Image (spheres, rainbow, N blue to C red):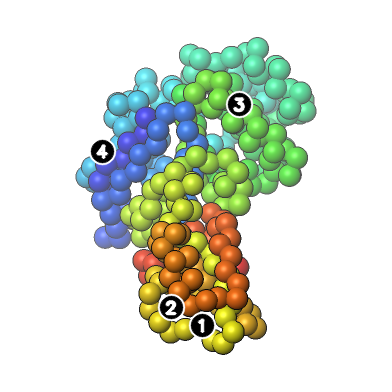
Amino acid sequence: MIEVKNVTKSFDGFKALDELSLHVDSGTVYGLVGANGAGKTTVIKHMTGVYRPDSGSVTILDAPVYENIDLKKRVICIGDDLYFYPTYSILDMAKVYAGLYPSWDWERFYSLKEVFPIDIKRKVRKLSKGMQKQVAFWIGICTKPDVMILDEPVDGLDPVMRRNVWKLMLQEVAERNMTVLVSSHNLRELEDVCDHVGIIHQGKVVLEKSLDDAKGNIHKVQVAFGVAMPDALKESLTLLHEEQFGSVYSLIVKGNVAQIKEEIAKHSPLLCDILPLTLEEVFIYELGGVGYETANIIL
């Protein structure tokens, strides 16, 4: 569906993307995460045809994106920085998009007034940021795109509206097989909606897996011994992080969970629990493994 292959992009000698590759399957929700300046927005601008790569290729639905007008009629992008014509009402903007997108659905537009209770005659630029974001989703959904690309999509929305918007997105994925790529710093929210995740660091994708697989290789372990944790155990595990709370050690360990349990069992622990890892923790410790400073982060 979305295929980015070995894309490199530089600006004034700075390499924003360094042979970056990622793949998004049809009908999935893909979360793209990374630290500030990692290259997320630059990737998105390649996917939407704003930038042309210095090298490599970007295709959607097996077609190149750059200067492909027909393809762009099947893709919608909602970013954090929205633009609406200064004097246009919601209805005026809807008419603009209806003229641009052949799949525009007027019936859907009027039915969504129940979800987005804003007078369609109001000028969009005079609405609050949160209400403008609602309008962006309202119009975006009505274009009935094959691909929706979201950059920090729900910033400015209240909790109830955030839930309603995600419900609508997932409904489109389930009913029309729409593909969604979403870039966000709200990892706890992504965890609830994403099928796959890609972690980007310094212009490269350092991890790309299904969400379950991404969590499956890194484990949080709580363990206690009658004395201090044996040095031999530390040496046998791939430790990403270690904290001690009294007699209990909280460990982040990379590897096969059965082998980890086996190694710990050799030292007769008083307590050994394997706890579920959040996407936020996966992000922090995966980036820690490639040199990103995580030492002072407390979870």
Question: Residue 244 is drawn in which quadrant?
Answer: bottom right
Residue shown at 70% from the left, 30% from the top? 123
Q: Position of residue 239 (x, y in %)?
A: 43, 72
From this viewpoint, which residue is outermost toward the bottom? 227
CA separation in Å, label 1 and label 4: 50 Å
Question: Residue 122 is drawn in which quadrant?
Answer: top right
* Type of amino acid under label 1: Met
Q: Are marks 1 and 4 in contact (CB under 8 Å)?
A: no
Q: Are marks 3 and 2 in contact (CB under 8 Å)?
A: no
Q: Which residue in the protein does label 2 denote?
A: 233
Residue 31 left/right relative to 155: left
Which of these two is toward me, 25 or 18? 25
Q: Which residue in the protein does label 3 denote?
A: 171
CA separation in Å, label 2 and label 4: 46 Å
In which quadrant of the rendered image does the N terminus lie?
A: top left
Q: Secondary structure at mark 1?
A: loop
Q: Which tag, 1 or 4, sits closer to the chain's start? A: 4
Disc 3: CA contacts within 10 A as few (<14), some (14-19) or many (>=20): few
CA separation in Å, label 3 and label 1: 49 Å
CA separation in Å, label 4 and label 3: 31 Å
